[in-house]
Amino acid sequence: MKALIIEDETAAARNLAAILRTSAPDVEVVATLESVAESIEWLRANPQPDLLFMDIHLADGDSFRIFDAVEITAPVIFTTAYDQYALEAFKVNSIDYLLKPLNEADVRRALSKWQRLTSSERHSYGSRVRTMAAARNEREEVFLVHVRDRIIPLRHDQIAYCYTANERVTAYGYDGTAYPLDRTLEMLQTMLPETDFFRANRQFIIARRAVKEIVVWFGSRLSLHLTVETPERIIISKARVPEFKAWLRSVHPGE
């Protein structure tokens, strides 16, 4: 059986490949891809594998975007560190998923489940995956950013943080690209999903995927370091610390 791994975390991809070599030696990993763009290119140029292991959040966006560009007929097992809404959708639609960090027992169980499915059951499963992906993509808000004579679509999952200064609001991508927005932070706060974004203070709205490190600051405040550079230090006030910690715990249970 040929399997394709779509995962942007090198350690996680290597761990999954190692588990497959140990617990399922008949599974051949034909490629490991790291982004939405790379996955679309590969799937267009190669025969589809027998099975896909697909991380939800990739470096350049939500992996559900792949389904918009390529008709995926192979069964998909999703992997994720934690995504409350995705997990709820998987459960409702009986879609298979694995929570990170992956372990051999869970991978074995998922593969055993697939081996027991009949051809018609696999076809039905594939239809449910495609329907769920389409529904999720339709719900995704897109900001249209006007830059000179161009209009650039900016998806929520591309935004690392939003920043306001001198009455101007700018969204920054994970690659540091700046996108001027014609909305206030107050407006953005109501438009961006609160599960994934937090109003840190008067200047910043941050994406949880962008939070790299939290430092205890003076006066029981918190200082946030993101995966991308910011124009000034992001400080969480003492009064907002409990709310911020609750927000982190709500998307990362057990912390």
Image (spheres, rainbow, N blue to C red):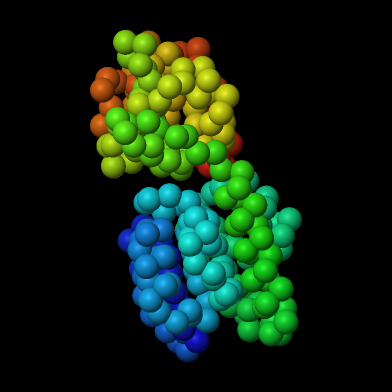
Above or below, 252 against 8 in this view is: above
Above or below, 33 against 114 in this view is: above
Residue nearer the viewer, 74 or 200: 74
Tell me which corner region of the image, top left, top right, bottom left or bottom right, holds residue 202.
Answer: top left
Residue visible at 40% across and 65% down in the picture: 39
Number of marks in the image?
0
Tell me which corner region of the image, top left, top right, bottom left or bottom right, holds residue 237.
Answer: top left
From this viewpoint, is residue 107 visible? no
- The residue sitting at the bottom extreme is 26
Residue visible at 45% across and 35% down in the picture: 144
From this viewpoint, is residue 47 visible? yes
Q: Residue 126: x percent and y percent?
A: 64, 71
Apparent side of residue 177 relative to residue 112 in the rendered image (left or right)? left
Residue visible at 60% across and 47% down in the picture: 138
Apparent side of residue 138 relative to residue 30 in the rendered image (left or right)? right
Residue nearer the viewer, 37 or 57: 37
Residue visible at 50% across and 39% down in the picture: 142
Q: Residue 121: x percent and y percent?
A: 72, 78
Above or below, 148 against 120 in this view is: above
Q: Residue 140: x percent and y percent?
A: 56, 43
Above or below, 122 against 190 in this view is: below
Q: Residue 96: x percent and y percent?
A: 63, 65
